[in-house]
Amino acid sequence: MLRPVFQSLFAVCGLLLCVAAQAEVTPCRLPDFPQELRCGKIQRPLNPDEPAGKKIDIHYVILPSQDKNKLQDALFLLAGGPGQSAINVASFGQAVLSRLNKRRDIVFVDQRGTGRSASLACPEVENAADVDNEEQMLKKTDACLARLKTLPYGDLRFFSTSIAVQDLDAVRVQQGYDKINLVGASYGTRVGLEYLRQFPRSVKRLVLDGVVPPDMSLPAGDAQAALDGVFGSCVQEAACNASYPQLAARWQQLLASMPKRISVTHPRLGTPLNFELRRDLLLSLVHKTLYSASNTGALPYVITQAERGNYQPLITLSGATNLPGAGSINYGMHFSVWCSEAFARPLPAAKDEFEQLMNRMYERTCKNWPRAKIPDGFFTLPVAQSPVLLLSGGIDPVTPIRHGAAVAKALGSNAVHVTLNNAGHGLLSQGCVRDVVYRFLNAKQDQDALHVDSSCVRSIPRPLAWQPLRETQEQRP
């Protein structure tokens, strides 16, 4: 039984090299983990075509298996954004994948441009205390771009997805893993698909949560459909329709009333916040709330209150004034990816105002942003040689079911597509989804993985419309 194991080790990197690779990590601690982790880094060329040229460090953290009889198919979590730090969201990854950690290492690699790996953070954008309109945001992104260009690694042409997955594989080789499992969320699904394309023999299984195909342009194509779904659901839900009648018409009236000077209390600072609410900013604030299914339950109340002149719920729910958190975006990396990959081909014509706003913002931001050269193969989806599980939400404004369906079809018979009709963006924490993912990745045989039972997800309901508390006689002092 040992012979195949040693053959696999030699096939990856040679036994002596693997032993040396293990020495590259050191014991470390992260704030959200009581146990000791292992931290490592690997030096990589900024420009892959110049291996002897300028270098950057790619940092990663390993959550070690807790079992002495651990399995060698480690699990890599691929963060979203683009621009999230995988290390910063490691506690979330551990929470949803903890059962797999019993016998497998879980690895969190900060993609180049994020977190600890040649960060392209834009504090000018990320730490904003104000609610910015389009012009104000463009000034901040321009200032960020000028500053990023002065960094030692400030050639922003070398932060594309295609280059990043080569870093990821270098970590796999350094740690002596053979075939690995990958779990990608949102933009992380694009990373997973590109890794599968470039390194198909290194993938055991792949999970794609909220599918971002390589040919997807910008993430606004389904925002209007998601908002229309909120309106339609409210009409069908008796309590919602009674509390918020003619919701779609009220939304149109609210849009038509812009621009308007408004005054609210800053949700975080508690200070007065005064600004001009324009039509484009209103669309942007509502778009933010559509990502979360639970937030969509509050949208009928928010829209109705705003139409009546109370904008406090809208500003608060949108999170526009929040400080960066663990899942926040490094916007320099975000724009380096989107400006290169979305604009490698002409943008499709906008179908609605959400798309018009998104296209205009990115066209203006990307006008002077350095762009990576995107290989033609990036936009292809070869038939998968390993099992792939795709997860899609029916009310997702960014990565709808049709994206998952198209990718599953292209990947072929080794792809299984699970849909949650009443879920939004990001499904790993929804109901029994983590159990489905566990059974898929833990199945001993590929055919067992492809026939994983996902029937439990059908019973997940859509969040009910939020209703304000009403004072009754019993509640009065």
Image (cartoon, grey):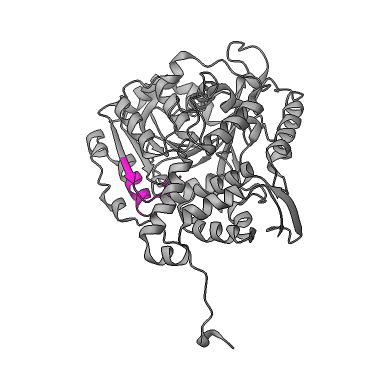
Q: Is residue 48 left or right of residue 2?
A: right
Which residue is at a point 24% across and 35% down the rendered structure image? 445
Which residue is at a point 47% across and 38% down the rendered structure image? 186
Residue 432 visible from this viewpoint: yes
In the rendered structure, which segment of residues is drawn in magenta?
A: 418-438
Does the stretch in magenta take in 275? no
**Above-or-below relation of 232 to 6:** below
Which residue is at a point 36% across and 41% down the rendered structure image? 391
**Above-or-below relation of 70 to 16:** below
Q: In front here: 54 or 245?
A: 245
Does the stretch in magenta take in 430? yes
**Above-or-below relation of 28 to 332:** below
Question: Residue 400: x, y in percent?
Answer: 40, 39
Q: Quadrant of the N terminus?
A: top left
* Quadrant housing residue 269: bottom right
Which residue is at a point 65% across and 46% down the rendered structure image? 324
Question: Residue 214: x, y in percent?
Answer: 45, 25
Q: Quadrant of the C terminus?
A: bottom right
Q: In front here: 36 or 354?
A: 354
Q: In front here: 176 or 124?
A: 124
Q: Is residue 110 left or right of residue 454?
A: right
